[in-house]
Image (tube, helix red, strand yellow):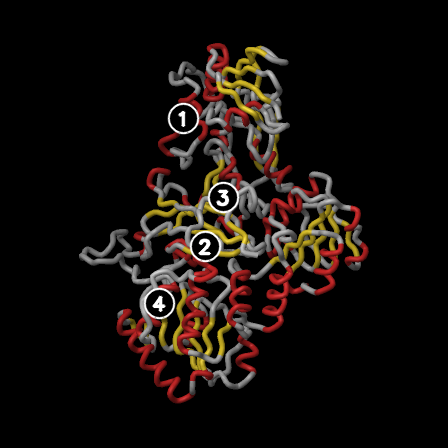
Amino acid sequence: MPKLIIDNIPVEVPEGTNVLEAARSIGIVIPHFCWHPALGRAGACRACAVKMLDGPVKGLQMSCMLPAQDGMVVSTTDAEAMAMRRSVIEWLMINHPHDCPVCDEGGECQLQDFTIAGGHGIRRYDGRKRTYNNQYLGEFIAHEMNRCIQCYRCVRFYQEYAGGTDFGVMGRAAMVYFGRQSDGPLESPFSGNLVDICPTGVFTDKTARFRARYWDYDMAPSICPHCSLGCNITPVARYRELLKVVARRNDRVNGWFICDRGRFPKANVNALDRPRQPLVDGKATSWDEALDALRERLNGFLELNGTQSLAIIGSPRMSMEGNTMAARLHKLLDTGKICYFSDSVHAGQTLEAVASLTPDNAASQEDVRQADLVAIVGSDLLAEAPMMALAVRQAWRNGAPVYVVGEETSTLFEYVAVASLSDIPLAEAKHPVLICGTNHVGSDIIDTAARNKAKLSFILDGPNAFGCALLSQEYGATPLSEAVASGKIKGLISFESDLTLELPAGIRVLAAADCRKTPLLSRAEIVLPSSAWVEMDGTFINNEGRAQRFKQVMEPGLPIKGLDPAGHPPRLHRNTPPGGEVLPTWRIIAKITERLGSEWIEDPLSDQWERLRELDAEGEGISVV
């Protein structure tokens, strides 16, 4: 490992680390624009100059382009290096529109930060600025080309890292343009990362445009709920409205990026007509009245039909806290069934997939990115888990062959289509990974992976499907389709469930808790409004068995802009915001169990799940396999 000295501080870094990264490792931030940890070096902006005082290289050098070597003595504060950085930033600012007061990037802009850090603060240029026409890039991303400093980050990510073909760089010399050949929506399912990766305000989130500044945001570390991969995100909210979602770095999971499916859908959280008040037989009521009504109807139902006629329904999109509390309610009532999955095929394959994973063979997204052979069985990754397709692309870019059994519509990487697993040379690879859709789990796939020491990755259905599978094993859960087919179930209580089967007319839905308007809620006798994921703390376990914590981002309630046509909330004093009566599902279940005579439960994670209580939401998570 190379040993060098940076600003009189000795540092030892891994082989291949550049000087800029070495400086960052000891808290010295050198201004830079084109370099990005996920994209590598480009040497395009020339803003990261340092002075090499001694060693194999001397003089002014660009720190992003220079690998760290033994004996180097580096100065980031040398007068010549600082003058170089100051001049480069002044050149970049010559054509910049200086529109910080109206730019959505204000407050989170690298150009702002490094302009000040670089010592440039006086505008000397009074000539005509270079200007461009902006493009329409779709409903999600705004384009302000005049702010561009030609760092090339956007095109390097879009074309090289993400495999997009409809966006690039055009022009020549000082008149280069980053955009499309013609106006139109960006086609890449990862286009939203342009917003995060651009160091200025060329690309901004159109869905949150002109809504708030960085210092106005409510933010907290969170986990994407839109598939089973558990990508790390930071939701941004203000005035009880989810404004936007940005990627959060986790090197073991999503790295630096997220897909557009995880970035832009916000309707379920912000919907004005989502369940926000308890209902009994369709009429709004208080929590106490709704819970009392549920207790009375539940007691009457059990007295008439017996405990074995009731099913408690959990959900792969509900947190571990909610699902463990559903199991406690099942035990308290001694009900006939607890169900976490709708159909037996899906349940059986998910349980088989989870049971086959061990700490040694469970593949993270980083394992996929570093694989030297990838085999995909029965999964359209772009449709089911886009970030996994992006991870496969990185392995392919590094030279790993990709084999596909079945259909794969991804255009992110080249692959060889084969008829069966036996046609894939897994034994020739040192670090093979086998990716499988849940609907194609089988003993042959698991045995093949074991024989060839290949790591396994299963694409599951829901952000907490893995956790539901573990709870199903622990509590002997039954798929709802089997429970209904037995003819014994006469009623059910559902928590955040997306049923895929048609319930017989004779089955009563005594109560349903959810934050979405689902068909099941319209059939429920009692509706209990639950918090959305950004309105509470919780835990998801992703497809590799990695438990990760997400934190509350905002207070629940109607967004201010939806309260009154005039844009002002009702002028009356109250203890909670309008529409803020919702509760996390686990607290709803705790209230139900308390009404039924059990003690109040302050923390739903107990026994073998206690270790999840102290999870660091900003960490990499822990394995539960």
Taking the spot 56% from the left edge, 21% from the top edge, the residue there is 63
Q: Nearer the viewer, residue 619 or 223?
A: 619
* Residue that carries the numbered disc 1 in the rendered image: 98
* Dot 1: element: loop
* Residue that carries the numbered disc 4 in the rendered image: 590
Q: Do the residues labelled 4 and 1 touch (CB within 8 Å)?
A: no
Specify the label residue 247 is tagged with.
3
Relative to 210, residue 557 above or below: below
**Alpha carbon distance from label 4 to label 3:** 33 Å
* Dot 3: element: strand
Q: Which of 308 and 159 is in front in this view?
A: 308
Q: Do the residues labelled 3 and 1 touch (CB within 8 Å)?
A: no
For marks 2 and 1 on the same chain, the one whose residue lies earlier in the sequence: 1
Identity, as a three-letter code, of the amino acid under mark 4: Ala
Taking the spot 45% from the left edge, 80% from the top edge, the residue there is 310
Q: Are marks 2 and 3 in contact (CB under 8 Å)?
A: no
Taking the spot 26% from the left edge, 52% from the top edge, the residue there is 566
Tell me the mark number nearer the camera, choosing from 2 and 3.
2
For marks 4 and 3 on the same chain, the one whose residue lies earlier in the sequence: 3
For marks 2 and 3 on the same chain, the one whose residue lies earlier in the sequence: 3
* Residue that carries the numbered disc 2 in the rendered image: 612
Q: Position of residue 237 (x, y in %)?
A: 37, 47
Tell me the mark number nearer the camera, choosing from 2 and 1.
2
User: Which quadrant is the C terminus positioned in?
Assistant: bottom right
Q: Are marks 2 and 4 in contact (CB under 8 Å)?
A: no
Can residue 159 be seen in this snapshot? yes
**Alpha carbon distance from label 2 to label 1:** 47 Å
* Dot 4: element: helix
